Image (tube, rainbow, N blue to C red):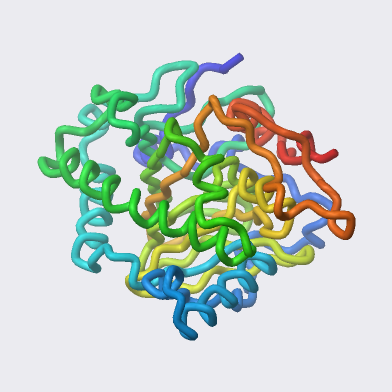
Amino acid sequence: MEKPKFKTVQEVIAAGEGLPERYLNIPTGNDEGQPLNGSVPVMDIPAIDLSLLLSSSEEGREELSKLHSALSAWGVVQVMNHGITEEFLDKIYELTKQFFALPTEEKHKYAREIGSTQGYGNDMILSDDQVLDWIDRLYLTTYPEDQRNLKFWPEIPNEFRETLHEYTMKQRLVIENFFKAMARSLGLEETSFLDMYGENATMDTRFNMYPPCPRPDKVLGVKPHADGSAFTLLLPDKDVEGLQFLKDGKWYKAPIVPDAILINVGDQIEIMSNGIYKSPVHRVVTNREKERISVATFCVPGGDKDIQPADGLVSEARPRLYKTVNKYVELYFDYYQQGRRPIEAALI
């Protein structure tokens, strides 16, 4: 059951009341007393040329091999030549920035309602001791079009709605090609994962704003989690780092690669790939001086589809690791706020 909503982070800052304790993370045994904003190494992940992934040329095969290596080691890649221009991505970034700079009363026209994820504000609070994330966000279902709830789509900035529609349509092509490339990289029929993703799959886009934080050593923008999607497309801030991934018990920061879209595997591709491609745990750290903006699109399989390991990836040598799951995302949010991984419930 959802608890009453808390002020947005921008409202907390404007009120000048200092840092509420609700945002302070309690160190766990795994952190070895490291401050949250301590120095971490950069991840070694390749930039993949999406235009080559579906080519049968030697270059295409090399690119597929790079994709396989990155997704099995990290679960993350930077994607170049994805067909969306730098100017257009900059426009998405600028419109996001403009929306969060609007007066509070204007943004509250699109406020999230109790019990719903869509709209402006912060995430649901499900318990009195839930640590809050230092983030304000606007969360919108963008596809299929008949599932859009336009009362949450900002009318200001003026071009926001039409640009988001255009971005959604451009992303659909990237998503289709990436599903095909992942299947090919595992030696499967090109449409193996797309068929499981289904005709009724949804896209949810989340515009994130992380204001400057007075205690980056104690406060997280987003607590550690893995995504419940099939995979997630992220347009990161071009200037401010913050996104980090966990590998072998250590945190690594994602590099900023101009014009690239970062794609990370979600739990549902981990299940479909029978654990070959990993859904990585990640978090966002805060920054004392600078705000950070990012835009994430979650690709969620249709609720009518059963998600299970692809037949071609199960053998005596590699037995099936996961049960068949359905409507996985409905499990997801409760687990996230408890700091648990819902994929554990899917293991055989």
Write the residue at 42% across / 58% down.
177
Quarter holding residue 260: bottom left
Tell which of 239 and 85 is nearer to you.
85
In the rendered structure, the answer to whether residue 261 lies left or right of residue 102 reads: right
Quarter assignment of residue 105? top left
Q: Nearer the viewer, residue 239 or 278?
A: 278
Res 165 quadrant in image: top left
Count how many numbered circles sit on residues in the image. 0
Q: Residue furthest bottom?
A: 58
* Residue 109 seen in render: no
Left or right: 59, with 72 as reference point? left
Above or below 296: residue 17:
above
Image position of 295 with respect to 305: above or below: below
Which residue sits at x=53%, y=69%?
254
Q: Position of residue 54 (x, y in %)?
A: 43, 68
**Residue 35: x, y in percent?**
68, 62
Q: Quadrant of the N terminus?
A: top right
Residue 119, x across and y down, in percent:
36, 28
Q: Nearer the viewer, residue 286 or 201?
A: 201
Return the x and y of residue 149 as percentages of the image width and height.
30, 23
- Left or right of 162? Residue 263 is right
Q: Is residue 71 above or below residue 11?
A: below
Residue at the outermost left position: 158
Horizontal placement of 296 versus 343: left or right?
A: left
Quarter of the picture holding the C terminus: top right
Residue at image coords 25%, 53%: 92
